[in-house]
Image (cartoon, grey):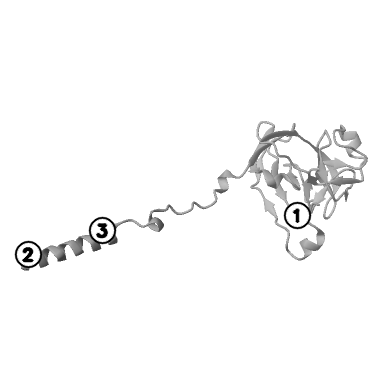
Amino acid sequence: MFTRTAAVIAALLTTVLATVLAPSATSAAPAAAPADRAAQPRTAVTFTVDDCEGCEIQLSSAVGTYAEADAGKVDVWNSKVKTVEGGSVTFTVPTKRTWGMSVAVEAPWEGFTGYRTTLAWRYNGELQGDTVTLAEAVTKKKASACWEGTRQREVTIPIVVEKVRVQGVRTDVNGSIAFVPTTESWLKPMREVQDGVLGSQDVNICH
């Protein structure tokens, strides 16, 4: 009698332990991996520029309407500041941030202008693909600070940055004019410029 009871108990214990220790389908399933930001498409944007060694460049991107900007709904992105070395500078950025991208340039020779020199992607009267010289650029009255962007993984964009005299905060000072020598695709708005010089005191909202 004792032997049979012990056997029954042993069998019951074996069944219970097997049930407890057996891995469940839920516990065996691996946790879902979080979205990998590094997997998002990225683009290497290289700017080439002559005679601007030491110039500091920063990119920004903001797409929306002025009403959205007033409501604080525009997603604003800024890159780190990089310095032109050897005639070029490269930024590797999320591809989606090239849409509505603006380029701020600060040259070593600039005085107290009260604004940030901004690259003109397109001047009034020019179409995509048109060439622009310095002599033409300084006659322009409007320009776009907003690039339409790219889906390419690598792109090289020649730019022109030249020293010019501009009206500063207190008096005339050395400033810069910055533009693309070949007109690029662009977004609105077209802003007023002074002798081709595009300056920004805030983020450019593009649309």
Coordinates of residue 199 in the picture (x, y in percent) = 81, 49
x and y, in percent, of residue 13 in the image:
19, 63
Mark 1 residue element: loop
Query: Residue 203: which disc?
Result: 1
Residue beneath the point at 12% across and 63% down: 7
Please report whichever mark, 2 or 1, sits nearer to the chain's N-terminal start.
2
Q: On the rendered structure, is 92 left or right of 14? A: right
Which residue is tagged 2? 3
| N-terminal label among 3 and 1 | 3
Q: Residue at coordinates 49% horizontally, 51% vertically from top-left?
A: 33
Which amino acid does the dot numbered 3 rest on?
Ala
Q: Where is residue 159, by image quadrant? A: top right
Say what secondary structure mark 3 lies in: helix
- The N terminus lies in quadrant: bottom left
Amino acid type, mark 1: Val
Mark 3, residue position: 18
Q: Nearer the viewer, residue 11 or 84?
A: 11
Q: Residues within 10 Å of mark 2 (few under 14, many from 20)?
A: few
